[in-house]
């Protein structure tokens, strides 16, 4: 573990996250890396509730709750005002879910990154609209059941590749991270903190409620997503320099899918097809990282 | 110093004098002249402000909500579709009690595309918790914009300065532009009552249950009531320094008037001319110009209209299925008074059509020659169209 991480907690135990909530674990680690001189912009997401109702707050940093689709824009204003007051030291952090990032907040995020606004944007990704009761988002993976993709209408479209969309903006720093790999997550959050311009962290955050898994499986499932190459750990600097941070051991996608209720309808043939898609994506990433033979 | 300025530039000069710190804008005709000047002022150092070139009006207001929450003075300008896109965040700005100031250039809403004046865009935002002031000329635009910051920061509510597309935004007039030191005496630096601060971490806008939520909304209602009183205080302070005052309404020849026009925006100027001609013919006519629309100055309106027999409300806007919006507001303000004038509603000048002195005089005679209104609103200058099945 990095030694210069806060031993104090900036997430209090009174939060109202579900047992095993990956988003809560992600918050705890990121705030340890960023520290107390951080102002958070919090567009609508599970964390709008997890942080606790008025007049309480589970977070020991200033929080500005914001409209769903405004994560990038609200942070733009916070940064501008801090700069006008001569405060260039405070980190501005937008903390958003996958719906607020991939879907409704994508324009605002794209605008902010194109302007190279000086802030960190964290998307904690639980692959659906979990706060409203598990509806599909453009981050929901191929094969998944949600309450709006039920029965034979399970999602048959790929998950949007949000990191590559940001890389296309030539964002100074974009990285994936996982709650199951805390050293890697802390290092990336600290690295982001020490950079300028727009920085994006995409954190895989399991959701026992929405994924139909036991809460004690939260970390294991998140780890397997990395080990199967479903969610590779990598980082990209200046939209050009790729570094792959973790080399998986030949785990099969099948094992990850079979543990989760949201995928239980899939046939062996479906799983073979998904394995092929995951292999393709990994090959593509290797080529981008210049490692493909 | 007197300068010949476009209405848009009168707004920009006021924003410069108010020492706004963060400006955010997205281009839309006919608002562009306001923000182009301000962008140049930020670039050339005339203003010490940050200009955010955001990717939509929605993001524009979101950015100002972020900036204002950190405790700096903010401004934007928009029109028509842009204001409609901002709608969600207009509620947000008022609910968060942020004293943001915005210039809104009235523009007709699509379809079809129409860049000309129509008040429906801003009046459709009447329930968002924004103070709204409708201006008649360039001087009023400049003065009201400077006053808007003091009023907004006093009651912690956002203010919308409303001006007609082209007739005001693109019309050059002589405008007295005050010196910066004079404005400094009127408008001190912004002292936020709350702000995001890492030394005192708080959460703004958290989840709130029905009990607290309703109390918070009541506080906004009280602040709006207070704004009506504070508007007078702000005008007093301004008049003491600059010797100009507009009032929440302006009553012109109302004392002995039997028929009173109700106007807003640039139609008022045209109506002043029509009024002169009517008075010259011995007609007992008057004008009540409505400047302050939210909070609506109900008591003043009742007082100014108490002796009139009829009022002719000119609406450059329409609420489909009801009537002109000012006419609705006037009926609502008057209905509980023991005796009040009959309310005649007229829709005119929609989508930039000219409202001429002749049209206003036609409205006067229509009103004088009718016992009671035939309709809630009469659309002026419409050719009857018979549609095929």
Image: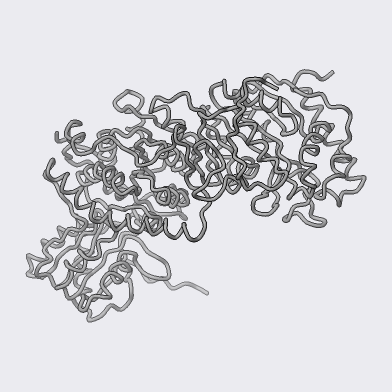
Say which residue appears at 14% left-offset and 62% top-offset. B275
Please provide percent x and percent y for residue A129. Answer: 67, 49
Report the side of B137 relative to A231 (left or right).
left
Nearer the observer, B10 or A26: A26
Please provide percent x and percent y for residue B259. Answer: 17, 71
Q: Quadrant of residue A32?
A: top right
Nearer the observer, B65 or A210: A210
Report the side of B23 relative to B362 (left or right).
right
Q: How many marks?
A: 0
Report the side of B264 relative to B219 (left or right).
left
Q: Quadrant of residue B226?
A: bottom left
B181, above or below A53, in the image: above
Please provide percent x and percent y for residue B70. Answer: 41, 36
Please provide percent x and percent y for residue B57. Answer: 45, 43
Report the side of B314 relative to A268 (left or right).
left
Quarter of the image that includes the N terminus of chain B: top left
Say which residue appears at 29% left-offset and 37% top-offset. B15
Say which residue appears at 14% left-offset and 36% top-offset. B2
A288, above or below B377, in the image: above
> What colour scheme does the image use?
one colour
Nearer the observer, A131 or B351: A131
Residue extending furthest toward the bottom: B371
Nearer the observer, A289 or A246: A246
Residue extending furthest toward the right: A268
Asked whether the viewer can see residue B339, the reply is yes
Asked whether the viewer can see residue B294, the reply is no
Q: Quadrant of residue B330?
A: bottom left
A169, above or below B165, in the image: above
């Amino acid at each position: 573990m990095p030694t210069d991480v806060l031993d104090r907690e900036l997430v209090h135990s009174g939060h109202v996250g579900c047992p095993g909530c990956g988003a809560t674990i992600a918050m705890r680690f990121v705030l340890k890396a960023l520290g107390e001189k951080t102002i958070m912009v919090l567009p609508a997401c599970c964390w709008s509730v997890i942080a606790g109702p008025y007049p309480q707050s589970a977070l020991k940093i200033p929080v500005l709750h914001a409209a769903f689709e405004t994560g990038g824009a609200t942070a733009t204003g916070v940064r501008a005002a801090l700069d006008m007051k001569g405060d260039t030291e405070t980190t501005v952090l937008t903390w958003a879910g996958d719906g607020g990032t991939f879907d409704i907040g994508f324009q605002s995020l794209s605008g902010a990154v194109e302007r190279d606004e000086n802030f960190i944007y964290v998307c904690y990704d639980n692959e659906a609209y979990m706060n409203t009761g598990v509806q599909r988002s453009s981050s929901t993976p191929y094969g998944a059941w949600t309450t709006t993709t039920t029965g034979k209408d399970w999602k048959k479209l790929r998950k949007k590749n949000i990191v590559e969309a940001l890389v296309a903006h030539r964002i100074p720093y974009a990285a994936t991270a996982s709650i199951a790999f805390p050293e890697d997550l802390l290092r990336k959050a600290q690295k982001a903190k020490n950079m300028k311009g727009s920085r994006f962290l995409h954190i895989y955050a399991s959701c026992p409620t929405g994924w139909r898994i036991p809460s004690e499986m939260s970390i294991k499932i998140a780890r397997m997503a990395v080990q199967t190459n479903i969610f590779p750990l990598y980082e990209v600097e200046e939209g050009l320099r790729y570094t792959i941070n973790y080399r998986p051991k030949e785990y099969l996608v099948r094992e990850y899918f079979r543990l989760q209720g949201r995928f239980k309808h899939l046939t062996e043939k479906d799983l073979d097809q998904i394995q092929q898609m995951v292999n393709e994506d990994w090959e593509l990433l290797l080529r981008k990282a210049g490692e493909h033979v | 110093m007197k300068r010949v300025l476009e209405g848009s530039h009168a707004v920009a000069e006021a924003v410069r004098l108010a020492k706004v710190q963060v400006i955010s804008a997205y281009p839309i005709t006919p608002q562009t002249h306001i923000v182009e000047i301000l962008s140049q002022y930020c670039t050339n150092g005339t203003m010490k402000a940050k200009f955010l070139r955001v990717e939509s009006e929605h993001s524009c207001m979101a950015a100002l909500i972020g900036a204002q929450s950190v405790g700096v003075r903010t401004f934007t300008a928009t029109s028509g579709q842009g204001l409609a896109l901002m709608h969600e965040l207009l509620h947000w700005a008022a609910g968060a009690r942020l004293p943001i100031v915005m210039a809104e250039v009235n523009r007709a809403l699509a379809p079809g595309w129409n860049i000309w004046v129509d008040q429906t865009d801003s009046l459709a935002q009447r329930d968002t918790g924004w103070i709204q002031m409708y201006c008649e000329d360039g001087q009023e635009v400049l003065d009201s914009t400077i006053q808007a910051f003091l009023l907004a920061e006093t009651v912690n509510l956002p203010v919308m300065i409303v001006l007609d597309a082209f007739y005001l935004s693109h019309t050059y007039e002589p405008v007295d532009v005050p010196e910066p030191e004079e404005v400094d005496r009127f408008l001190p630096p912004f002292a936020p009552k709350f702000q995001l601060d890492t030394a005192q971490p708080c959460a703004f806008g958290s989840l709130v249950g029905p009990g607290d939520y309703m109390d918070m909304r009541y506080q906004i209602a009280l602040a709006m009531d207070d704004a009506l009183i504070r508007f007078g205080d702000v005008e007093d302070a301004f008049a003491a320094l600059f010797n100009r005052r507009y009032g929440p309404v302006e009553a012109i020849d109302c004392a002995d008037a039997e028929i009173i026009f109700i106007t807003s925006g640039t139609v008022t100027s045209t109506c002043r001319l029509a009024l002169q001609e009517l008075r010259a013919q011995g007609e007992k006519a008057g004008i009540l110009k409505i400047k302050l629309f939210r909070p609506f100055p109900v008591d003043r309106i009742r007082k100014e209209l108490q002796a009139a027999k009829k009022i002719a409300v000119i609406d450059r806007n329409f609420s489909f299925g009801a009537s002109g919006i000012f006419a609705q507001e006037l009926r609502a303000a008057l209905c509980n008074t023991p005796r009040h004038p009959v309310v005649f509603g007229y829709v005119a000048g929609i989508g930039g059509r000219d409202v001429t002195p002749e049209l206003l005089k036609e409205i006067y005679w229509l009103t004088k020659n009718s016992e009671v209104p035939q309709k809630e609103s009469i659309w002026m200058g419409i050719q009857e169209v018979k549609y095929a099945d």
